[in-house]
Image: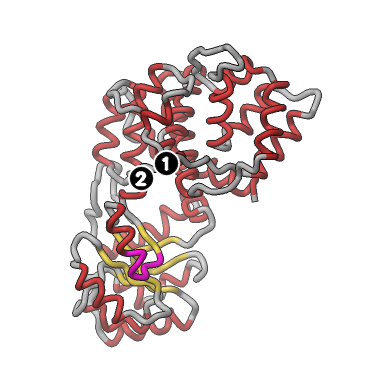
Amino acid sequence: MYRDIGSDTACTVATEAASARVFSDAILAMGLDTLTAGRRAFMNVSRNVLLTDIATLLPSKSVILELLEDITVDDDVIAACRRLQKDGYTLALDDFTPGCPTEALLPCAGIVKVDMLSTTPQERAKIRSMVPKSTKLVAEKVETAAVFEEAAAAGYHLFQGYYFCRPATFKARTLSASAATYSRLLVVLNKPEATVFEVEELIKRDASLTYRVLQCVNSAAFGIRRQLDSIRQALVLLGLGQVRKWASVWVLAGLNVGGNPEVLTTAVVRARCCELVAESIVGRDDAAEYFLLGLCSLLDAMLGRPMEDAVSDLPVTDNVKGALLGEQNFARCVLDAVIAYERALWTESAALLEQVGASPDLLSAAYGDALGWARGLQQAAA
């Protein structure tokens, strides 16, 4: 999606220009693979982009060409869609409703997107009966667990909406972990020359490892019970010998099962982004706790527990714990700015950055770096 300037909350230029800019500047500047982690990107295309075959500048396996509901559908557009479909491109129809102009394009569409807020259950049932079985349905604006469950039961394949950042609460669930990360950690720990810095870099890559290191420090068995402001400090207090023992236990316990990988990815991106923003404001030495802040910001989703329960036993500073519990402190302001940017709430994000004395342009670079960093971790673990 395209925004002309960082403060825009919606696309303020013509679809024609927006499509062209996305295909050129955004993709070339940041890199499509960095933005999507190797998955296909939904990209809005205008009538002219369709008719001139500009879309074919990108490989068919890297994009899904999305047609907005207000596109003028005529013989030329239908012919262009058939041509793209024949060339292996997947077409998506946005905000589809019975009787809308893009209904004529259903035979060419591989994906149909339905707005859960603006359609009734009856309309959604009718759409399901209209769409060919080979076409995937995407539920947009999924705001509650009930809507998600309804859409899943109705045969929808993909889902998007704020519900996925507002998880339902369950009694207990174990964090998933990366077996590859654990394996590399054990290799590093068993090197005589292993340093705290090397171990910290590996542990920072996995939310469940971070959580368990912090739990160890705060357990009665170690008798430490003190607040921490970084993973490195926890490692120094524990000692590499203790970490080595615990890592072996975690590997054997098979802690790499269950959990939602997309929630973990979001947490890692937030962590790195919060750290980079904080570095420019408070300096690198004091930015470590902001990595913890971002990484723990989705603990309620990872553990299936209310945030208050999830952080109750973590030996993080009052600053971080207060921010995680919604206290409007400096750290919370940084986290909220990152979350707002993540959700494309540009104006809100810029205002929050100004409150902490940072430039609104800071997050663009930080978020791009964080995406690349998270992508690098995924590739390393593959």
State the image coordinates of residue 33 (x, y, percent, origin top left).
52, 55
Residue pointed to by mark 2:
167
Look at the image and tell me whether residue 146 can be seen. Answer: yes
Q: Circle 1 sits on which residue?
A: 304
Whole-Å distance between the Cαs marked 1 and 2?
8 Å
Rendered residue at 48%/19% (across/down): 315
Query: Within 10 Å of the Cα at label 1, are there few (<14), some (14-19), or many (20+) other Cα atoms?
Result: many
Residue drawn at x 48%, y 54% as measured from the top left: 36
Q: Amino acid at mark 1?
A: Gly
Question: Which residue does the image show at 81% across and 24% down from the upper left?
Answer: 192
Tell me which residue sits at (70%, 39%) in the image.
252
Task: Say above or below: 105 vs 212.
Answer: below
316 left or right of 74 in image = right
Q: In the image, 339: left or right of 270? A: left
State the scheme by which the image is colored.
secondary structure
Mark closest to the chain's N terminus, 1 or 2: 2
User: As shown in the figure, which amino acid type bears the numbered disc 2?
Assistant: Pro
Where are the magenta residues, as a range? 151-157
Q: Give the image location of residue 297, x and y in percent.
A: 41, 34
Between tags 1 and 2, which lies in front? 1
Q: Position of residue 129 (x, y in %)?
A: 29, 80
Residue 92 appears in the figure: no
Count of numbered labels shown in the rendering: 2
In depth, the one of 193 and 158 nearer the eye is 158
Q: Secondary structure at mark 1?
A: loop
Residue 331 falls inside the magenta stretch: no
Q: Using the image, determine if residue 185 lies above or below residue 170.
A: above
| Circle 1/circle 2 CB separation < 8 Å | yes
Mark 2 surroundings: few (<14), some (14-19) or many (≥20) residues within 10 A: some
